[in-house]
Image: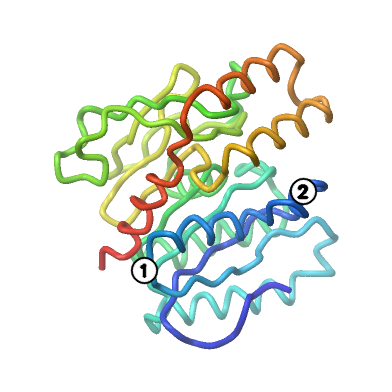
Amino acid sequence: MTVENQDNVSHVAVLVLDTPIPNITEKYGDFGDNTKDLLSKHTTTKIKKYYLAYSTSPEEYLTQLQSTYKELEAGIKQGYITGLVLTGSRSDAFGEEPWIKLLDEFIVNVIIPSKVQTAGICFGHQILCKNLGAKIGRNEIGWEAGTTPIEVNPELKKNSPFSGLSKFNMVEFHQDIVYELPPGCVSIGSTDKCNIQGVLSPNLLTFQGHPEFTTELALDLLKYKFEHGLLTKQEYEHYKSQTVTFPNQGTEIGEIIAKFLNKN
């Protein structure tokens, strides 16, 4: 299944950019489910999921994927897609997989020119910034994971979505980062391991972290990554401690995203 349903009613489109994670998706849903759950707490706007990532050979999915992109493009141009959210992914935003290249083309040829309100999460943040001209790549100092305090950029205007905030805590799971700001964007904040924790412009709001991840999901995902050799024992214990210590403010960030998507 690539599209949740086919009715052309006004809605926010969640572009799901990963395939199911064994033992995680069964319990918590996929990244699209997590994002939809987060936004549904703060908006009455309809939310539809569009599945754009594949782990099979291109011959098995390209025709269907191109059809999905045509539906998305029509929805944006006709105005019944009022906002977009690009989810996270275990893939690299600088990858060469055919589905990633198609997403690159869609961002450049449709999303950016349309000026539709767009939010990006983790991989979504990175691939949007990449296609706006920013350098992205592997973080030389490794993983950032678990619930993490983020310092809000003090240069943000008072009327920004972050007015009144000096810091917030969000779940992180990434080893790639955005190295520079895209033209016309400002950084929303930083951590010791990542100087650009998201970007803001009139039509774009992104986060390196995962506001859609609950603390329970984060703890299980930390365990999954440790058991699969992606985190050392020391890293696992450190990030686990942070996750049970710092309050997860993903829900508050979800409200910021929902208001941003409904701005127009």
Q: Nearer the viewer, residue 2 or 216?
A: 216
Q: Residue furthest bottom?
A: 7
Quarter of the image where the N terminus is located: bottom right
Instruction: Count the numbered circles shown.
Output: 2
| Rendered image quadrant of residue 237 | top right
Amino acid type, residue under disc 2 in the picture: Ile
Classify mark 1: residues with Cα within 10 Å, few (<14), some (14-19) or many (20+): some
Q: Of marks 1 and 2, which one's residue comes earlier in the chain?
A: 2
Q: Which mark is residue 21?
A: 2
Q: Nearer the viewer, mark 1 or mark 2?
A: 2
Write the residue at 59% across / 47% down.
Answer: 88
Farthest-out residue, left: 158
Nearer to me, 105 or 5: 5
Residue 99 x %, y %: 69, 59
Q: Is residue 110 above or below residue 173?
A: below
Q: Is residue 258 left or right of residue 135?
A: left
Q: Residue at left 49%, top 71%?
A: 47
On the picture, is 175 further left or further right than 164?
Answer: right
For the residue carrying disc 2, how many other residues have a C-alpha within 10 Å: few (<14), some (14-19), or many (20+)?
some
Q: Secondary structure at mark 2?
A: loop
Above/below status of 254 relative to 117: above
Residue type at tag 1: Ser
Tell me where residue 35 appears, x and y as whole percent: 54, 56
**From the image, which quarter does the C terminus lie in?**
bottom left
**In the displayed structure image, the side of residue 149 where residue 89 appears, left or right:** right
Which mark, residue 114? 1
Q: Quadrant of residue 113?
A: bottom left
For mark 1, give the secondary structure: helix
Q: Position of residue 189 (x, y in %)?
A: 35, 30
Could you say where residue 75 lies in the image, as x and y percent from the top left? 46, 80
